[in-house]
Image (cartoon, rainbow, N blue to C red):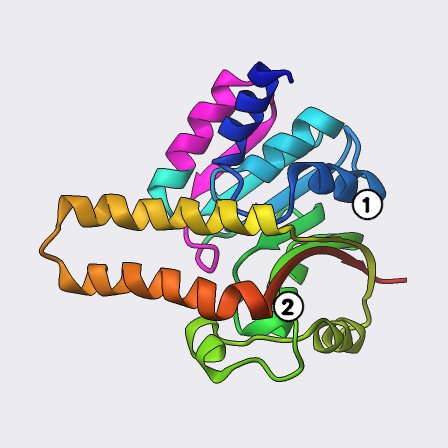
Amino acid sequence: MDYKNLLKKLKESEYLISMTPVERLVEIGYSAGMNNSSAVLDLCCGYGEMLKIWNEAFGIRGIGVDVCHEFIEAGKRRIAESAASDITLIEADVFKWQTVETFDYVCLSGEDFGGFQGTIELLEKYVKPNGKLIIGTRYSKVDNPPQELIEFEGETLSLIEINRIVRSKDYYITSMAADTRAEWERYIMWSAKRHLNDLRKSPENQLLREWCDKWYDMYFNYRRPYEGYVTMVIEKI
């Protein structure tokens, strides 16, 4: 086994805030037609890892926007230390950030604003005519998800319901990449470790301790059996 490349891949995966594997994200970019003339906007970009992946794979130009200072600063360092180029990360609230530029691809992963339909409407503000939207979203594996999951996550739609909304907005799903159990485990434990690091700094913080307990309980009791994650490309005819 090539342990050096394995360790490199593990290190890089720490910065991918998604339950879609790197290989499938590259597949998404390829099937969506990304190339070195493509302009990509990623809202709530985290560390900007998706833009970095697509830049290295296809030569895209990208802008990422996220409100989290930690994510943006770490992402800038990673991009500066890598072979990626023409990627700009901006620390800003996506609702307050403005640009007159439009993009070939507009993305949002892991967040929703006003539900799935509201997410589409937000991304549409920035997409070129005939451009494509790329959305990473949770979905329910069952028709009637447990109320505990809905209360924890908010809107929890099935893939059937998501497709119905896509079609109601006159889009079609043209590429999909589902989660894997391993990627869920990586994400859940990545986030858990961040919570635990905060708790170590403030061990007397009872609310934070309760949140840490709830994070694990929700995953094992509800998220693992009932929830999935998918990254999809949607476009109009």
Q: Secondary structure at mark 1?
A: loop
Element carrying mark 2:
helix
As displayed, is residue 190 above or below residue 130? above
Tag 2–tag 1 contact (CB < 8 Å): no
Task: Name the residue at the front extreme.
Answer: 1
Quadrant housing the N terminus: top right
In this picture, is 234 found above or below 66?
below
Q: Residue at x 75, y 29 (%)?
A: 58
Residue beneath disc 1: 32
- The quadrant of the image that shows the C terminus is bottom right
Residue 226 disc label: none
Q: Is residue 58 magenta?
A: no
Task: Mark 2: give few (<14), some (14-19) or many (20+) Cα within 10 Å.
Answer: few
For label 2, the residue is 121
Residue beneath the point at 60% across and 52% down: 181
Q: Position of residue 70 (x, y in %)?
A: 34, 39
Q: Is residue 92 left or right of residue 112?
A: left
Give the residue type at disc 1: Ala
CA neighbours of label 1 inside 10 A, class few (<14), some (14 to 19), many (20+): some
Q: Residue furthest left?
A: 204
- The residue nearer to you, when weighing 182 against 178, is 182
- The magenta segment: 72-96
The foreground one among 93 and 34 is: 34
Name the quadrant containing residue 204: bottom left
Disc 2 vs disc 1: which is toward the camera?
A: 1
Residue at 82% in and 72% down: 170
Residue visible at 78% across and 40% down in the picture: 27
